[in-house]
């Protein structure tokens, strides 16, 4: 048995689904990117331990840029969720 749903309830439900999809799909790429960056950095350090300092700095820069995309996805998700967009 279905309960009657107003247009406002449907809009809220769809907005929350869209916000969930925005953050979910928006963080898949940065998650994979961070994994690839750390993997490459660990392999480089394993092959040439003398360059660990330089590789670590570049690894953290790559992680920061990748996580920036995740933060943008969070921002868009919040904008959708709070009906600002």
Image (spheres, helix red, strand yellow):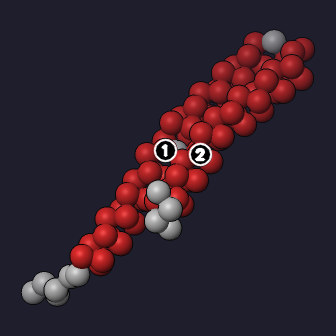
Residue 13 position, x and y percent, is: 32, 71
Mark 2 neighbour class, 10 Å CA radius: few under 14, some 14 to 19, many 20 or more: some
62 horizontally vs 32: left or right: right
Mark 1 neighbour class, 10 Å CA radius: few under 14, some 14 to 19, many 20 or more: some
- Which residue is most to the left? 1
Q: Which residue is mark 2?
A: 72
Q: Which mark is residue 26?
A: 1
Q: Residue at x 71, y 28 (%)?
A: 62
Camera-side mark, 2 or 1: 2
User: CB of mark 2 within 8 Å of CB of mark 1?
Assistant: yes
Q: What secondary structure is found at the residue carrying circle 1?
A: helix
Image quarter in which the N terminus is found: bottom left
Residue 21 position, x and y percent, is: 40, 53
In the picture shown, does residue 38 fall above or below 7? above
Q: Residue at x 87, y 15 (%)?
A: 51
Q: What secondary structure is found at the residue carrying circle 2?
A: helix
39 horizontally vs 48: left or right: left
When asked about the image quadrant of residue 56, the answer is top right
Q: Residue at x 23, y 81 (%)?
A: 6
37 horizontally vs 24: left or right: right
Residue 75 visible in the picture? yes
When asked about the image quadrant of residue 42, the answer is top right
When asked about the image quadrant of residue 18, the answer is bottom left
Front in this rendered view, residue 2 or 54:
2
In the picture shown, does residue 47 fall above or below 56? above
Front in this rendered view, residue 7 or 49:
7
Residue 81 visible in the picture? no
């Amino acid at each position: 048995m279905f309960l009657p749903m107003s247009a406002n309830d449907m809009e809220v439900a769809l907005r929350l689904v869209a916000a969930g999809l925005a953050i979910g799909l928006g963080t898949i790429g940065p998650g994979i990117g961070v994994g690839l960056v750390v993997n490459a950095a660990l392999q480089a350090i394993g092959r040439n331990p003398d360059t660990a300092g330089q590789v670590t700095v570049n690894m953290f820069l790559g992680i920061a840029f990748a996580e920036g995309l995740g933060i943008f996805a969070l921002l868009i998700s919040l904008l959708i969720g709070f009906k600002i967009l």
